[in-house]
Image (cartoon, rainbow, N blue to C red):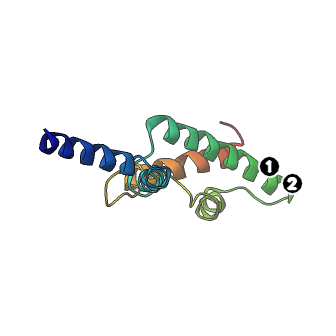
């Protein structure tokens, strides 16, 4: 009977060790870091980023007008390069990156808002 209980007791000890706060914190941190570096932004997150990009474009329009500068597509494209380098990835996995189509949509959204001063 002692032989049958020993593996069960050993498994219980291992489970308790795996559930220790230190192990749980480390596992949670790993999952969080992994999700930041290798996952694509959700649809909602990307739509929120486009909304923020539009607002940046409108603010840029206002700043340029306030300085009496001419607002052109070229000046807005240059501002886009400076202001929107924090775009989330739309491609997940180990090679998470922005696709060309996503980068182009971000630029078009910003430039449109920057030139017009509107959403």
Residue drawn 18% across the image and 46% down it: 7
The mark found on residue 62 in the picture is: 1
* Quarter of the C terminus within the rendering: top right
Disc 1 residue crowd, few under 14, some 14–19, many 20+, Cα 10 Å: some
Residue located 31% across and 54% down the image: 93
Q: Which element carries disc 1, helix, strand or loop?
A: helix
Q: Going by the image, does 96 lie left or right of 116?
A: left
Task: Say which residue appears at 42% left-offset and 51% top-offset.
Answer: 31
Image coordinates for residue 114, horizontal then vertical, percent: 67, 49
The single residue placed furthest to the front in the displayed view is 1
User: Can you tell which quarter of the image residue 67 is in?
Assistant: bottom right
- Rendered residue at 56%/58% (across/down): 86
Badge 1 vs badge 2, beta-carbon distance below 8 Å? yes
Against 82, residue 72 (above or below) is: above
**Which residue is nearer to you in this view: 24 or 66?**
24
Q: Dot 2: what SS?
A: helix
Left/right of residue 4 with respect to residue 86 in the rendered view: left
Dot 2 crowding, Cα within 10 Å, few <14, some 14–19, many 20+: few
Quick one: 32 or 90, which is closer to the camera? 32
**Measured Cα–Cα span from mark 1 to mark 2:** 6 Å
Q: Position of residue 102 (x, y in %)?
A: 43, 49
Coordinates of residue 51 in the picture (x, y in percent): 61, 39
- Please indicate whether residue 4 sits to the left or right of residue 55 in the image: left
Query: How many marks can you see?
Result: 2
Q: Which mark is residue 86?
A: none
In the shown orientation, is residue 74 left or right of residue 34? right
Q: Position of residue 69 (x, y in %)?
A: 80, 60
Image quadrant occupied by the N terminus: top left
Residue ID for mark 2? 66
> Nearest the camera: 117 or 40?
40
Q: Reply above or below: 72 against 5.
A: below
């Amino acid at each position: 009977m002692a032989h049958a209980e020993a593996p069960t007791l050993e498994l219980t000890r291992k489970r308790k060790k795996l559930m220790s706060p230190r192990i749980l914190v480390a596992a949670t941190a790993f999952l969080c870091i992994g999700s930041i570096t290798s996952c694509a932004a959700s649809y909602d997150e990307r739509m929120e980023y486009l909304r923020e990009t539009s607002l940046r474009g409108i603010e840029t329009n206002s700043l340029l007008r306030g300085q009496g500068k001419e607002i052109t597509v070229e000046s807005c494209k240059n501002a886009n390069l400076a202001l929107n380098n924090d775009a989330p990835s739309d491609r997940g996995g180990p090679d998470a990156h922005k696709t060309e189509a996503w980068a182009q949509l971000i630029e078009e959204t910003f430039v449109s808002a920057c030139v017009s001063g509107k959403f």
